[in-house]
């Protein structure tokens, strides 16, 4: 009996070994795919967060840079408005000081006031004010000069300065006030002809009025 049982067991074992093996469930594979997908999504989110962080960081750095530049600019040109107001007042004062007089007492007063005028202007120079060098005969520069009027002298080149009406000034590298000048411009022939014709017409009308009177 014992031997038969052993034989039966051995036969079953043989049958089990020869039987086809069952396939493993696909659940594990799906779980791995899900984990991989989740990992990819996390990586994408991290990449997006990192990109936003770097962008915000760059914007903050640019903002700091602009603020520093604005602050430096504000400090550099802090006296611009004050200098602009003082220049006109100083020029009027300067014109009064250059008046001609034979009174010795007034001359002494004027001498003292000229010294004060020089001290004020030297203080402005130290703050950054300088005169725009403009001379008669210079080529007209619209970036530093303003044409108050025009005239024509045939013996001089066109678009050159004929007269400096007012000095110009710089505040550091900015125009505080352009030089006021008269420039040499040849009149347009048509305009000149019209002006002559208009003048002749006015003369004829005046003559006619005199005759009527």
Image (cartoon, helix red, strand yellow):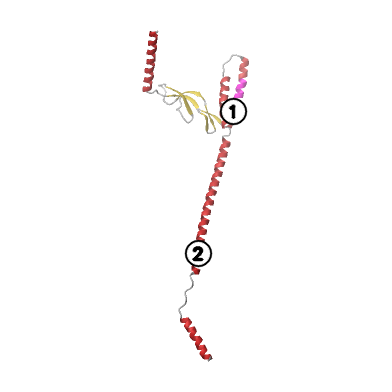
Residue 126 x %, y %: 59, 31
Q: Does the magenta run of residues contain 91?
A: no
Q: Secondary structure at mark 2?
A: helix
Q: How many marks?
A: 2
Vertical side of 36 occupied by 204: above or below: above
Q: Give the number of the disc on residue 2.
A: none
**Residue shown at 50%/57% (left/top)?**
44
Q: Quadrant of residue 87?
A: top right
* Segment tinted magenta in the rendering: 111-124
Q: Is residue 135 visible?
A: no
**Residue shown at 54%/42% (left/top)?**
66
Q: Quadrant of residue 160?
A: top left
185 to the left or right of 116: left
Q: Give the number of the disc on residue 34.
A: 2
Q: Is residue 201 visible?
A: yes
**Residue shown at 52%/91% (left/top)?**
3
98 to the left or right of 206: right
Residue 161 x %, y %: 46, 25
Label 1 and label 2: CA atoms lie apart by 81 Å
Q: Does the magenta run of residues contain 117?
A: yes
Binning the other alpha carbons within 10 Å of mark 2 as few (below 14), some (14 to 19) or many (20 upward) gives few
Quadrant for the C terminus in the image:
top left
Vertical side of 125 occupied by 6: above or below: below
Binning the other alpha carbons within 10 Å of mark 1 as few (below 14), some (14 to 19) or many (20 upward) gives some
User: What residue does disc 1 label?
Assistant: 122
Vertical side of 58 occupied by 19: above or below: below
């Amino acid at each position: 009996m014992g031997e038969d049982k052993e034989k039966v067991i051995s036969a079953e074992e043989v049958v089990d070994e020869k039987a086809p093996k069952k396939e493993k469930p696909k659940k594990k594979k799906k779980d791995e795919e899900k984990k991989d997908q989740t990992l990819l999504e996390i990586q994408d989110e991290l990449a997006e967060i990192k990109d936003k962080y770097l962008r915000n960081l760059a914007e903050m750095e640019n903002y700091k840079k602009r603020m520093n530049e604005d602050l430096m600019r504000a400090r550099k040109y802090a006296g611009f408005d004050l200098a602009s107001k003082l220049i006109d007042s100083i020029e009027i004062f300067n014109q009064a000081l250059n008046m001609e007089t034979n009174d010795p007492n007034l001359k002494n007063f004027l001498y003292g006031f000229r010294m004060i005028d020089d001290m004020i202007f030297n203080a402005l120079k130290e703050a950054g004010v300088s005169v725009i060098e403009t001379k008669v005969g210079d080529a007209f520069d619209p970036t530093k000069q303003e044409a108050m009027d025009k005239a024509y002298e045939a013996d001089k080149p066109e678009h050159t300065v004929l007269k400096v009406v007012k000095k110009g000034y710089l505040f550091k590298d900015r125009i505080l006030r352009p030089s006021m000048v008269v420039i040499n411009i040849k009149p347009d022939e048509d305009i000149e002809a019209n002006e002559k014709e208009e003048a002749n017409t006015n003369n004829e009308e005046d003559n006619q009025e005199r005759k009527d009177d």
